[in-house]
Amino acid sequence: MTTSIVLYGAMEQRSLVRPILVATAVSGTLDILFAVMLSLMRGRDPAAMLRFVASGPFPEATDWGAAGSLLGLAVHFMLMAIMVAAFVLVTRERRLSLDSPILAAIAFGLVTYAVMNLIVVPLRFPAAWPPKPLAIGTQLFAHIVLVGLPTAFIARRYLRPRGF
């Protein structure tokens, strides 16, 4: 009996890996491409933007050149994996969100926006507060459309029982 419970638990845990990896890859790629596009439109260097991302947990990364940029990319995808994993875990417990992926995406986008832009960024970069209206708009777009929607639909695809 214990073995079957352990095996079931292992299968349940294993089944979460694929949606987390796929949603992290898709959402993370869309989000970072949007950030690169915004950097270029503002006449800024995308590599410097990535070093700035790395400077959140590693303040010296802004001076690390290509290594700092690669670290920024890794930090970005690690943060995305944490956000996606949280969504997948909550979705697994509250399957109603699978029936309304657009509403789930909006809620997820708003929550991740609030956590990142109202808590995480101001704690590390106090000068970033208060955000400008354009920054609020672009960040909400990124969090809801580029992160929330793909994550919600990917979670739905992998977590919804077959035949539904």
Image (cartoon, rainbow, N blue to C red):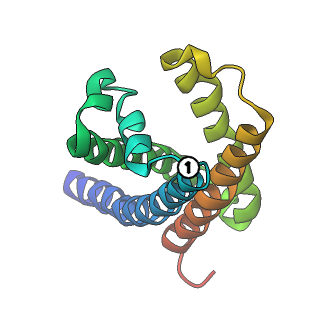
The x and y percentages for residue 88 are 50, 53
Mark 1 surroundings within 10 Å by alpha-carbon count, few (fewer than 14), some (14 through 19), many (20 or more): few
Total of numbered circles in the picture? Answer: 1
Residue located beneath label 1 in the image: 43
Is residue 53 depicted above or below 73 in this figure?
Answer: above
Residue at 33 percent of width and 30 percent of height: 62
Q: Quadrant of residue 76?
A: top left
Q: Position of residue 44 (x, y in %)?
A: 51, 46
Report the residue at 49% width, 44% height from top: 83
Mark 1 residue type: Gly
Q: Position of residue 144 (x, y in %)?
A: 68, 53
The reply, left or right, for residue 128 in relation to residue 120 is right
In the orientation shown, which residue stands out farthest toward the right?
133
- The x and y percentages for residue 153 are 60, 69
At 54% across and 74% down in the image, what residue appears?
157
Camera-nearest residue between 3 and 34: 34
Helix or strand or loop: what does disc 1 sit on? loop
Point out the residue furthest to the front here. 43
Write the residue at 54% across / 25% down.
Answer: 121
As drawn, 48 above or below 158: above
Quarter occupied by residue 148: bottom right
Q: Is residue 157 above or below residue 7?
A: below
Image quarter of the C terminus:
bottom right
Q: Quadrant of the N terminus?
A: bottom left
Q: Which residue is at the front of the view, 89 or 35?
A: 35
